[in-house]
Amino acid sequence: MSQATRYVLFAIWVAALAATPLWADNYTVRLAIIIAMYSALALSWNFIGGFVGYPSFSTAAFFGLGCYAGALTQKAGLPMVGAWVFATLFVGAFAAVLGVIILRLRGHYFAIASFAIVEVVRLVISSWGDLTGGGDGLNVPLVTGGPDAVAQTFLAVMIVIMLTVFAVTVFVDRNRLGFGLRCIKQNENAADMVGVDTTRYKVIAYTLSAMFCGTVGAAYASWTGYIDPSDSFSVLMTVKVPVMCLLGGAGTVFGPIVGTTAFLLLEEFFWARFLEYNRAILGAVIVILIFFLPGGLLRISYRDMVKRLTGRVSQGAAP
Amino acid sequence: MTILQTLVNGIVLGALYACLAVGFSLVWGVLNIINMLHGSLIILGGYLTFFAWHSYGIHPLLALPFVAIFIFCIGYVLQLTLINRVVNEPVLTTLTLTFGLDLILYNIMNVYYTATPVRVTLDLGIVQIGNIVMPVDRLLGMALALILTGLLYVVMRGSRIGRAIVAVRMDRTAAELMGVRVDRIYAVTFGIGALMAGAAGAVFSMVYPVTTNLTGAFLGKAFVVCVIGGLGSVPGALVGGLVLGIIESFAGQFFGPQHALTVGFLLMLFLLVVKPTGLTGIKGYE
Amino acid sequence: MSEPILVLEDVSRNFGGILALSEISFSLKEGEIVALIGPNGAGKTTLVNAITGVHPASSGRIRFLGVDVTGQRPFQAARRGLARTFQIVQPFPQMTVLENVAAGALFGGAHANMHDAMATAREKLEFTGLAQFADRSASALTLAGRKRLELAKSLAMKPKILMLDEVNAGLNASEIDGALALIRRIADQGVTIFIIEHLMKVVLSLAQRVLVLHHGSLIADGNPTDIVNDPRVIEAYLGEKFARRIKESAGNV
C-alpha cells in the first residue's frame, strides 16, 4: 500500500469517526470517543516505545496526572480548555524531569521503574486526600448541555487531540529527531558515537510520549465529570496502550491507529458476548499478537510466523 | 507499640517477602524475563491451599507440597511451550507476553473463586515474650518461608539441576556446548520460580487473607525485593525481603499504614537510579 | 611547524582501584599519521575512550583545537570532529548502509537536513567503495565491508582527527592493502590519523610517528625506525629475558 493510499484511508477513517453522531446511536458515539482517545494514547506511547524502543509502562501515570491536573485547575476556576493546556504542560514538565532521572536505566530496569512510577503517583494522589479527595475521588464541573451535545463536543475534542499527536508523529518521523531516535533504538552507543545527543533525544521522546496523555487525561476528566485514583491510574491501561501500538506496528506512523482500532473493535465484539472473560480475552489477544504478529498488523510476515512457530531456544541466539 | 515489636513484625513480614520474591528473582536472573504472572501464581497457591483445607479438611502443611508441585507443572509447561519461543526477544515482548498470560490466569481465578478474601484459620494462639506479642501462625509462616527459601538455596547449590541452572545463567553458550539442554533448563527454572510462588501463596493463606485483588501488590513486592537485594540470588532475595519488611513495618508505624507501600516503591526507584545492582551488589544481567 | 591539534596532559583513568592509564602526555599535529601500539591490555582502546569521552579521564587535561574537552560526552566529541571507529564494528543493523552513513553526516557532520546528509553519505560511500551496497541492510555486509562502513560513517562526520581502532583486525592480506590505500587517501585530505594497530607492516608503512603504550604508561614516542630498535619497546613486547638475549646476541655479532 502506498503512503498516499494510507493517508487517504486514514482521512476516511477520521471522517467516519467524526460523523458517528449523524448516523449512529449514543453507544457507538461513545465507542468512537474511546477509539480517538486510545489512538492518541497509543500514538503518544509510540514516541518512546516505538521510535526509541524503550519498554515504557508509565502511560497510566501520565494519563492519571493529566486527569487530576485538569480537574483540580478546573475546580480552581480555570476555564476548561485552559485546564487542559495546563495539564498538558504540567505532565510534559513532569515527564521531562523524570526522564532525566530514569532514562539512563535500560531494559528490564527501565521497565520496572516505569511501572513503579504509576504506583507511586497513584499512592501519592490517593493519600493526599485534602487536595485530591483521596480514594473518594473528585467531582469535576460538568459541561452544560444535554448528553448528546456533550458526547459530540468530546468526540470533536478527542479527535482533535488524536490528529495533533498524529501530526507531531509525522513531523518527528520525517525530521532528524525521528532518525536519531531510530539510531538509538538500534544501537544506543553507536548513536552516541555519531553525534546523537542520546540523553536529550530520549528525554524529548519521553516528554512527547507523556504530554498528550496529560491532555487526554484532562479531557477525559471533563467528559466523565468524576475521577478516582483506581480509574485514573489503571495498570490495565498502562499495558493496554503499548499492546495496541505493538498490535498495529510500533515505530510506524499509522501502526498505533490501526492497532488501537483493531484492539477496541475486537474488545467490543467479545465484551458484549463474554463479559465475564474480558481480561482473559485481552490476554489471549496479547498471546496471539506476540506469536503471530510480532511486527504488528502493518508488517505481517508469514515467514517470521512460521519461524516463530517452529523456533526453539537453541536456534534463536540473540543477534 | 515498642520499637522492638515493630522490628519483630518487620522481620516476620520480611521473611514472607523473601519467600514471595525469590522465585521471581530466579526467573529474572536466569531467563532475563520479568514474570508478570508471579503475583497470580502466588494467589493461585493460596487459593488451592485454602480450598483443600476448606472443602476437604486437608491441613495446609500437607497440601503445600502438592500445591507447589502442581504449580511447578504449570510453570514448566508454560515455559516449554510458549515463553521459550520468545525468550531472547526484547523486554517489551517477554514482559507483554507474561502479562497476557497473567490476565488469563487472573480472569480464570476470578470466575472460579471470585475476589472474596479467603484465609486458612489455624487458631494457634499467640506467644508473648516480654512486651513483644506475636500470633503463632505468623511465626509458623515465617519459619516455613525461611525453610522454603533455604531449601531453594540448597537445591541451587547442591543438586545437579541447580548447578545446571547456575551454569546456564553464567554462560549459556558454554553450558550448551557441554550438553546442557537449555530449553529444558529454562523450563525447569521457570517451573521452580512458579513453585516458589505457589508455596509462598500457601504460606500466605495461613497468615493473611488472600484475594485476586492482591496479585498486583504481590508482584510489586517482588519487584521491590529484587531491586533492593539484587537479582537472581537467594541471599539477595533474603536481604531484600528483610529490608523491605522492616522498612514497611517502621514506615507503617511512623507515617500510617497507607504509606508503607509508597515508601517501599520510593526506595526501589531511588536504588534503581543510584545502584541498580541492589544493596548486595550482586550483578544482574544488564 | 603547525600547532598541535590535540594535546593530552597527564591523562589518567582508573576503573575501581585499577589504574588503566597513567599520566599520558602527548600531542598530535594537524595532518599527522600517528600509530599507537602496545601489547594486549596495554590500555590502547581505553586511551581512545578517554579522548572521546566514553570513559572520561579521571585526572589530567585534554585539549582539542585549544579548547578543554576533558569531560566531554561522546556525542560532543563526534560533533567537534573527533571521530573514531570501533574494534568491534557498531552499525545500526536494520538500517541500510546509506542510512548508516547518513546518520554520521546528519548528527556528527552538522548537516541541516536529511537531503544534504544523504548527499554527503553517497559521496562517502563512493569514496570508500561501498556505493554498490548503499541500499543493502548494514547487517548483510561482510566483516571487511562493515569495517569500511565504520570508516565511511566516521568520514561523513567531517572529522579533523580520525581514530582507527584496529581497522585491519580480521581482514585478509588483500583487504588490508585496500584499507591501507583508503587510509592514505583520507590522510591526503588533511585529516589527522591516530591509528591503533597490531600489524607492524601497517605501522611501518603508514605512520610518521609511533607511540608505545605498556601497562597504561607511554613508554616511547618517536619515529618508526627508532621505535622498533628501542630496547624498552622490545622488552614490553617480548619480555625482559628475551630482550636481554636479543641484546646479547646483537653484541656477539
Image: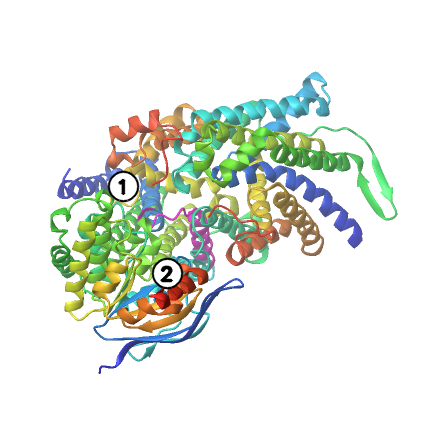
Residue A315 visible from this viewpoint: yes
Majority SS type along the magenta span: helix
Q: Quadrant of the C terminus of chain C?
A: bottom left
> Which residue bears the numbered disc 1?
A255
Are the residues tagged 1 and 2 within 8 Å (C-beta)?
no
Q: Quadrant of the N terminus of chain C?
A: bottom left
What numbered label is drawn on residue A67?
none
Q: CA distance from mark 1 to mark 2?
A: 42 Å
Q: Is residue A269 above or below residue A202?
A: above
Other residues around mark 2 within 10 Å, as few (<14) / some (14–19) / many (≥20): some
Query: Residue A85 location in percent, x, y?
Result: 36, 60
User: Do the residues at discs 1 and 2 belong to one chain?
Assistant: no
Q: Is residue B125 magenta?
A: no
Residue C73 visible from this viewpoint: no
Element type where label 1 sits in the image: helix
Element type where label 2 sits in the image: helix
Query: Residue C228 location in percent, x, y?
Result: 31, 66
> In this view of the protein, which residue sits in the foreground, C86 or C138?
C86
Q: Amino acid at mark 1?
A: Gly
Q: Residue at x 38, y 28 (%)?
A: A312
> Which residue bears the numbered disc 2?
C45
Query: Residue A6 location in percent, x, y?
Result: 17, 41
- Residue found farthest to the right: B130
| B28 lies left or right of A223 | right
The answer for which chain carries disc 2 is: C
Q: Amino acid at mark 2?
A: Thr
Q: Residue at x 15, y 43 (%)?
A: A3
| Viewer-side label of 1, 2 | 2
Q: Quadrant of residue A201?
A: bottom left
Task: Point out the stretch of residues depicted in magenta.
Answer: A50-72
> In this view of the protein, which residue sits in the foreground, C168 or A70?
C168
> In this view of the protein, which residue sits in the foreground, A306 or C190?
C190
